[in-house]
Image (tube, rainbow, N blue to C red):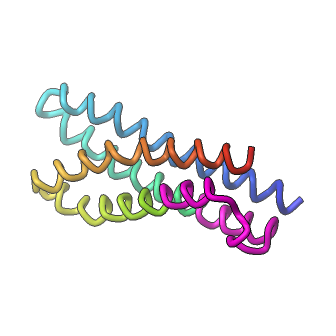
Amino acid sequence: MLDYTLMVVHFLGLAVGLSTGFANMVMAGLIAKAAPQEKAVLGRIPPAMARVGAIGLAMLWASGIAIVLTRYGTFAILPRPFIIKLTAVVLLTLIVGYIHVLMPRAQRGDAAAMARIQLLGKITGPLAIIAIIFAVITFG
């Protein structure tokens, strides 16, 4: 029963995290085409979605660690594809953390911070896909 619960939490975290990335891609397009008076209102959505995404990522970490420890007892016995998956997740987590550091500066109008967030945001999607692919290869 615990394993099923952990898997449900893990998949919910995945859904929340991925939906955040897609929502922010859509919002970036809408904000770019919006009238000036609409940009300020629409611009409040990506930071809110980023907080939701951080919750999803935390759910993934907590449930993922718990799954490995309850199923296998250690990370040491997991195969090379899992190490690739974990590397993608670590990089994704570091990038998301850095985006959260940059967000207050971008919200104050720092164009360089906003440009960096947009660039980093383009990296998070491929990292998430790599993590998913290698999770499937590892766990079937």
For residue 41, side relative to residue 90 (left or right): left
Identify the residue shown where x is 42% and y is 42%.
125
Residue found at the very far front of the displayed protein:
80
Q: Is residue 80 above or below residue 45?
A: below
Q: Is residue 133 magenta?
A: no
Residue found at x 61% / y 53%: 81
Q: State the image quarter where residue 99 is shown.
A: bottom left
Residue drawn at x 11%, y 54% as measured from the top left: 112
**On the picture, is 115 further left or further right than 42?**
left
The answer to whether residue 135 is left or right of residue 17 is: right
The percent coordinates of residue 119 (x first, y second) are 24, 46
Q: Quarter of the image for the N terminus: give it.
A: bottom right
Q: Residue furthest right?
A: 1
Magenta stretch prevailing secondary structure:
helix
* Residue 50 at x, y percent in the picture: 39, 52
Residue range of the region highlighted in magenta in the rendering: 60-89
Residue shown at 29%/50% (left/top)?
120
Instruction: Between residue 112 and residue 106, name the one nearer to us.
Output: 112
Q: Position of residue 118 (x, y in %)?
A: 24, 45
- Tell me where residue 140 appears, x and y as whole percent: 74, 43
Which quarter of the picture shows residue 122?
top left
